[in-house]
Structure formats: structure tokens, C-alpha cells
Image (cartoon, rainbow, N blue to C red):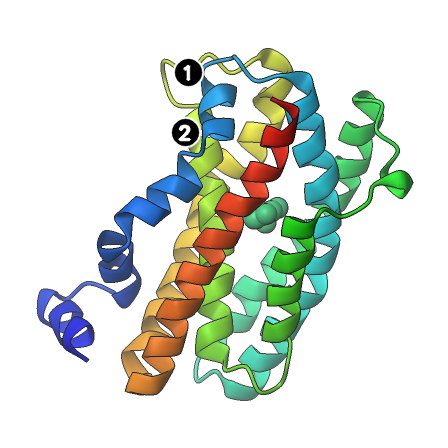
Amino acid sequence: MEEKAKAEQKKIGMTETWLKKHRLLYNGATRHPLIISIRDGTINTASFKTWLAQDYLFVRAFVPFVASVLIKAWKESDCSGDMEVILGGMASLEDEISWFKTEANKWGISLSDVVPQQANKNYCGLLESLMSPDAEYTVAITAFWAIETVYQESFAHCIEEGSKTPPELKETCVRWGNEAFGKYCQSLQNIANRCLQKASDEELKKAEVMLLSVLEHEVEFWNMSRGNV
Ligand SMILES: Cc1ncc(CN)c(N)n1
């Protein structure tokens, strides 16, 4: 309640307030050693391949999650524009899955043989819990925004001026680090802020806990690649 009042007072959104409050964990997710190693060009191939293979499985689970958010928007949202934003995100996942297949081919990865690691299973489990009709739209959209934003901020860092990202990884970084993806994340953040503004204290608490959970899972997800360092 106090945080909400503060956010309202400063006329900024709840999500911005939370990102400031949990800056350390957010930086842990968006400036992970794997991302830093891409940016400074010291990444090893095995780490990248582990990430690529595991993320393909994650994205396959992400599609039904986004579909479930779309259903919640249809049932619970008071703004018709939400559906278009979410639908746009879903549509681009088709292209993303094709991209993973092409990229895996390039790196000699057989995607049908990839086994999900524990951190990936845990993260997909979180997505599944959010797919329940009992999970509120506000909580699910907060998670959705956070999941997309971590990738946007992470990969944008790898294409900023001064980065030494290897040319063969540039395309990966641009995929999530580009401006259009940034605008899409901003649209998700606006939706989340609007929902959070109207949320009960109980819902607000659940959404904040969900944000922390997403950030922790993102760190664990990056950590999977460290087994190859
Ligand atoms: C683990 C993870 N987090 C986020 C994204 C971005 N959709 C992703 N592909 N994978």
C-alpha cells in the first residue's frame, strides 16, 4: 500500500517503482555473466549452444502461456487494446520458433534430442501455474512484461556502442534487443501499470512476488549455460 501510494504520488507506474526497489535482482537477470560474456566477446560456443537449445524448449512452453494471457485479457481486461498487443506478441512467436530451428541447424544442434534441464522445467512450471484460470490477469501480465523485458534489456546491452559481440551472435542479440521489441515491452509495461493501479493490495503483493520469481528464474535460466564454462 505504501509503495502504491508512493508510485501514485510520483505519477510513475508500479513496475518502475518495483524495478528501483529490486534493482539488484533485476541487474542480476539483465547483466548476467553470460550476457556480459556475449557483450565482451569471450563467450564460449558450448554455453551459447546450451542456452539456444534450452530456450527453444522454453519458447514452446511460452506460446500456450501467452495464449492464456490473451484469454484472460478477453475475459478480464477493461481495455480492448490489450488483446492486440498480446496477439501481436503471440504472432511473432511463430517466427521465433522458426528462427530457433534455423539457428539450431547452423550450430549443429538436434532440437528433437534436447532434454530440458531442471531450471528450465522449474521456469516452465511457473508458466503453467499462471495458465490456471485462477491466476489473475494482473499477475499474469506482470509476469509476461517481466519475462519479455529481461530479454530486451539483456540483449540490447550486447548491441550497444562499444560492445564486442561476435558477428555470429549479432542476429540473436538484435532479435530481442531491437527497438521494435523495446516498444512492445513498453506496451506490455503500460498494460501492467494500468492493471496494477486498479489492483487490490492482495493482488499487488502477488504481482510483486511474481516479478521477483520471474527474475530469479531468469537468473537460474542463464546459469544453466555456466555448466559449459
Ligand atoms: C528464458 C526466456 N526468457 C524470456 C524470453 C523472451 N521471450 C525467452 N525467450 N526465454
Nearer to us in this view, 221 or 143: 221
Task: From this view, report whether residue 91 is shown above or below residue 68.
Answer: above
Contact flag, marks 1 and 2 (Cβ < 8 Å)? yes
Q: What element carries label 1?
A: loop
Nearer to us in this view, 80 or 28: 28
- Residue 116 drawn at (x, y percent): 76, 48
Q: In which quarter of the image is the C terminus?
A: top right
Residue at x-position 49% and y-position 33%: 155
Category of crowding for the residue at label 1, using alpha-carbon neighbours closer than 10 angstroms: few (below 14), some (14–19), many (at least 20) = some
Which residue in the protein does label 1 denote? 163
Residue at x-position 54% and y-position 81%: 135
- Residue 34 drawn at (x, y percent): 51, 28
Give the residue furthest to the left.
Answer: 9
State the mark number for residue 215.
Answer: none
Is 145 situated left or right of 100 in this image?
left
Which of disc 2 and disc 1 is earlier in sequence? 2
Which residue in the protein does label 2 denote? 157
Q: Is mark 1 within 8 Å of ligand 1?
A: no
Residue at x-position 55% and y-position 38%: 223
Nearer to us in this view, 33 or 77: 33
Task: From this view, report whether residue 177 is shown above or below residue 29.
Answer: above
